[in-house]
Structures are given as structure tokens and as C-alpha cells.
Amino acid sequence: MFAARDVFRMFTTGVALITTAGRTGPNVMAAEWTFNVSYNPFLISIHIEEGEATHASIVETGEFGVSMCAEEQVVAMAFAGHFTGSETDKMSNELFETVPATKIKAPLIRGSLFTAECRVVQRVEMGDHTAFVGEVVAFAVEGERKPIVLHRGARHLGPRIDRGTKVAVAVTPSKAARGATVTVDGELSAPERGMKDVLIALRDGDGNELARAAAQTDRGGFFSANLQVPPDVAPGRHVVAARFGDAEGRARLELA
């Protein structure tokens, strides 16, 4: 029988060391719920329980530091998460080698994947946590490091998934009248995917080809083409297929 806590541990996330410098001095905590939520402006959202010392410091100062944990910081991450700044001066631990920020008062943690200095632009109460959305006013990347991945405990980032040679395709609209022109959009995943020819076909339920079109991928492997549906085809469910070599992607097309 699974408890809610067991389900929570099935999520896969990174984890950051969140630093503050309020009236009680500098503090650090581990925050699993740390997310990039906007590119422009560059916004990071962190989610903190109200009773945490970090919560009070962010409310007081309107700023926080984010140091995204690298594999070498797994012990520091655990220590920062297991103790509270209300009772323990965690920053006295030699695991936390700090570097000064340039635009906020909170220190940053050396050896991280990256560091970001944030000023709060939005605060949202979300159940038993508060989401603090901070605009990144400065950031730094020390060097190439590997992140800690949390999924039922701390794990390494594994090798990239090899998608092989695949075609994914969609047809718009997916419900059309006979004789209409539909748009076929797709993506080719392959070691070499740029400027490749893709054959597009409309088939009935028995696999008979009723119409065809051609497309060429761009440098990223994406393609688009218009497909003319014959006016004399039978109504019902049909298939739009896009083929590259032995790889084929299919989408459903309902004709009225």
C-alpha cells in the first residue's frame, strides 16, 4: 500500500541550495522544488514551507540566491535539508564554501552547477508552501558539472536516451471534409535529420493509398506540407502517414 510520501518520491527533479541573509544572518536550505519558469525575463520559482527560516528571510529581504546542486554536493544537500536555520547555523559547516553575490546580500555556494541571484517579483500561496518567483539579476556558471537527480533518493544523470530513427506527425484539422486541404506537421528524429525528404500519404482503413505529398526537413528535422484530400474518398477514419526510410509516423484523420 503506497502512502502519499511514496508517490511524492516518484517525481524526478533537481535540487538547489537556497541562500538568504536576513536579520538572523546567512542561511542555506535544500529546495527540491526549484524551477525556471520564464526565459524573458529570466524567472526562477522556489517553493518553501511557511515555517522554514528561509521563508521568513525571503519575506524580510525580498531576495534569495540559488545554487543548483552538483553531484559533489550530495552530502551538503542532505545536511542543508535535514536541519533548520532556526536552530542550527548551517553555514558554519565547511561543506558550504561561499562566494559573494554581486547584486544581492545573500552568499552563493561554490562548486554548484550554476548560481543565480534573484529578487522577488511575485509571491503565491500554494497549499502548505509559498511560491517565491524571483527575477534573476545575475548568474554564473563555474564549469561543466553534473546535476543531482532526485528520484527515490539522489541519483546520477544517466546517458542521453537514443531515440533512433523515428517520425512523429500530426494533421490539422484532424476532422475535415472530403476535398479539403489539410496541413501535415512532423518531426524526424535521426542521427542525420536535416534536409531529408519525407513521403506523406493518405490511406484508408485497409491501407490503400488515396493521396500523397512530399516534404523536406529543415536543419532541426521539422517538416510541414499541405495534403489535398480527394473529394470522392469514403467518409470515416483515415490515416496520414509520413515515411523516411523504414521509419513511419501516423496520425488519425476523420473525413466527413
Image (cartoon, rainbow, N blue to C red):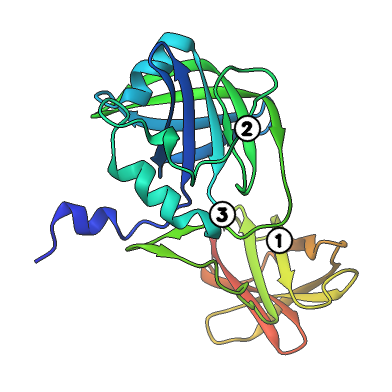
Left or right of residue 219, residue 138 in this image: left
| Position above or below: 50 against 67 | above
Q: Nearer the viewer, residue 30 or 231?
A: 30
Q: Earlier in the sequence, mark 3 or mark 1?
A: 3
Q: Which residue is mark 1?
A: 184
Query: Residue 139's image quarter?
Result: top right
Q: Nearer the viewer, residue 89 or 115?
A: 89
| Position above or below: 243 against 240 | below
- Badge 1 amino acid: Val
Query: Residue 87's image quarter?
Result: top left
- Badge 2 amino acid: Ala
Q: Residue at x 63, y 75 (%)?
A: 249
Q: Earlier in the sequence, mark 1 or mark 2?
A: 2
Label disc, if present, on residue 70 of the rendered structure: 3
Image quadrant where one finds the N terminus: bottom left
Residue situated furthest left in the rendering = 1
Q: Which residue is mark 2?
A: 116
Q: Position of residue 84 (x, y in %)?
A: 29, 33
